[in-house]
Amino acid sequence: MIGLDVPGGHNQVWQNPALEGSPKFPPSLSDTSILILQKERSLTTNRITVTLGDITTLAVDAIVNAANSSLLGGGGIDGAIHRAAGPELVAESRLLHGCKTGDAKITKGYRLRAKYIIHTVGPVWRGGEDEEEAKLASCYVSCFNLARKHDVRTLAFPAISCGIFGFPIERAAEIAVRETTAELDRNEAIESVIFVCFTQPIYEAYRQQLEPQF
C-alpha cells in the first residue's frame, strides 16, 4: 500500500493487486541501461495508475511491449519482456512478420503473469518533422483496438518511445494520458490501465499529466 501527497492536501492511499509482489530491484532489467528506482511510488485516478516498477512482473490481462519493427527482441523494455516470457515468444513473433511504426500486434504472454503481450512500435524522435506525435498516438489507439478484440480488461504500458528512441518525455506522457483517457471514456470494459515508468523523470511527467484529474 502506497501513500502519495497530491494537490489539494489529499493523501491518496491505494493498492493495486496487479502491483503486489513487484520487486524493488527488477531482475529482468538489471543488465540493461534502464534505471529502476529503489523507492516504489504509485498514483491512481479514474482507472489510470502511474507507477515505478518492472512491467514484466505485473498480473494483468496484457502488457504492452515497446518493440522494434522486427518484433524479435532488442534492448531495454523489449529485451526484458522477451527474456521474461521465454523463447516461445520469439518463435511466435517470427510468424507475425514484423510491425510498422504506430501499429500493434498481439502474442501470448507465455512465462509472464500477463495473458497477452501487445507489441507496438513507437516512433524515433526526429525533431518533430516526421509526424512523430501522430505516430505515437497511433500506438495507443492500435493497442486499445487489440485490447477490445481480445477482451483485455487490465492493461499495462511502458513509456513508449521514451528510451533510446528519444521522444520528449513531457510530450510522450501527454499523448499517453490523452489517448488513454479518451479510450476509457468510450470503453467501460477496461477496468485498469497502468503506466509503468522506469525513471523518476518519466514518472513525474506522467504524474503531472494525471494530477489535474483530481
Image (cartoon, rainbow, N blue to C red):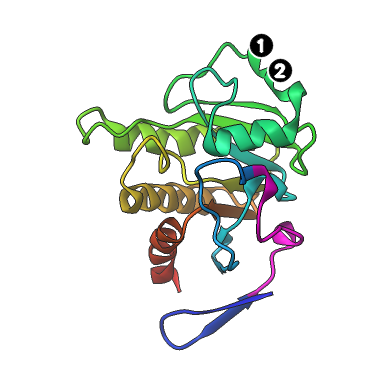
> For the residue marked with disc 2, what is the amino acid?
Glu
**Above or below 143: residue 207:** below
Question: Position of 6 compared to 16: left or right?
Answer: left
> What's the CA distance linking mark 2 and mark 1?
5 Å
Q: Which residue is mark 2?
A: 92
Residue occupying the point 45% across, 19% down: 100
Instruction: Please tell me whether residue 26 belongs to the stretch shown in magenta.
Output: yes
Q: Which residue is mark 1?
A: 95
117 or 154, which lies in front? 117
Q: Quadrant of the N terminus?
A: bottom right
Q: Secondary structure at mark 1?
A: loop
Q: Position of residue 200 (x, y in %)?
A: 45, 61
Q: Kindly indicate whether the residue at mark 1 contacts the one at mark 2 (C-beta within 8 angstroms).
A: yes
* Residue 78 appears in the picture as rendered: yes
**Secondary structure, magenta segment, majority class:** loop
Q: Nearer the viewer, residue 65 or 87?
A: 87
**Residue type (three-letter) at the residue carrying disc 1:** Leu
Magenta-tinted stretch: 14-28
> Mark 2, residues whose alpha carbon is within 10 Å: few (<14), some, or many (≥20)?
some
Residue 72 location, x and y as percent?
60, 20
